[in-house]
Every structure is written in structure tokens, then in C-alpha cells.
Image (cartoon, helix red, strand yellow):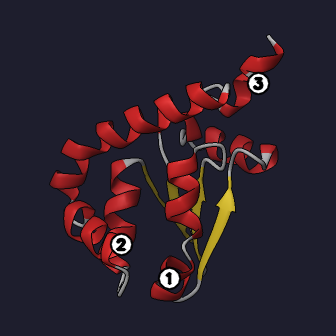
Amino acid sequence: MTLVLVYDGGCPFCRYFALRSELVGGVPGLEIRDGRGDQTLRAQLKARGLELARGAVLLDGEQAWHGAEAIAQLCGRLQPSDPLLALLRQIFQGPEQARRLYPLLLWARRMALQWKGLPEDPDAGDLRQA
């Protein structure tokens, strides 16, 4: 099966992490998808109770991890030589550590999206149009 990371492409932090070429190279078979840009994918995930507004999603066949668990699973599989990714792997590879620290990532995402004028929930529409 293909491992699929679904992230919020509107968040510059999420985009940077997801699109690092080393991340793709460090996890064989990883497919990276921008959930904000794919309404059909978001609807499929939401039907499974996996809302992009509450965190990234990692899929491996029918197995799904959401939020902190997704980041912990992904970081546990990374084999980076990049110092930043190596640090993130150390910080987030443990499920308990990821659960404690993930709210900080969500806060940073929320602030970045507000700065860009984007809603936290991709299905809510563009705040700049309101």
C-alpha cells in the first residue's frame, strides 16, 4: 500500500514540512496530498471522522492516523539527514510526546492561517471574501 500524508496546503508551516524533498525521500512510497486543495478528498476523510481542520492525516491502506498520531507515525518512519527534520523526528516520534506538543503545532497553524486570511476549516471558505 501507498502511505499518504494529507496536509493543509494553506498553512505555510504544514506546507514546508510536507513538501520537503527529503521528507519524501526519507519515507519510501510516501504520497503527499494537499487536503485544502482537494474537496473530494476532504469529504472522504470527513466521512471517516478525520477533519483536516483538526490535523494532518496519514493513511496506509484502510489504516488512518489523525493529528498527533499521524505526526508521530510519520516521524517514526523518517530517516532524515536534514537537521530540522531530524529534530522534529526526535520531538514527535513518540506518541505521548506528540500528543502533548501537537496543540502547539495547531496553534501555529491557526495563527498562520489567520495571517493569510484563510479559515481554520478549509470547508468554511475564504475569510477574505467575507
Q: Are marks 2 and 1 in contact (CB under 8 Å)?
A: yes
Q: Are marks 2 and 3 in contact (CB under 8 Å)?
A: no
Residue extending furthest top? 130
Q: Which mark is residue 85?
A: 2
Q: Disc 3 marks which amino acid?
A: Asp
Q: Are marks 1 and 3 in contact (CB under 8 Å)?
A: no
**Mark 1 neighbour class, 10 Å CA radius: few under 14, some 14 to 19, many 20 or more:** some
In which image quadrant can residue 74 be found?
bottom left
Helix, strand or loop status at disc 2? helix
Q: Which residue is mark 1?
A: 22
Q: Between 97 and 10, which is closer to the camera in this rendering?
A: 10
Could you tell me which residue is drawn at 31 percent across and 77 percent down? 83
Could you tell me which residue is drawn at 79 percent across and 43 percent down? 39
Could you tell me which residue is drawn at 29 percent across and 65 percent down? 88
Q: Which mark is residue 126?
A: 3
Q: Could you say where residue 82 lies in the image, as x and y percent from the top left?
A: 37, 81
Helix, strand or loop status at disc 3? loop
In this rendering, does residue 46 appear at all?
yes
Q: Between 128 and 77, which is closer to the camera in this rendering?
A: 128
Dot 1 or dot 3: first in sequence order is 1
Cα gap from disc 1 to disc 3, whole angstroms: 31 Å
Split into 4 quadrants, where in the image is the C terminus?
top right
Q: Between 66 and 37, which is closer to the camera in this rendering?
A: 37
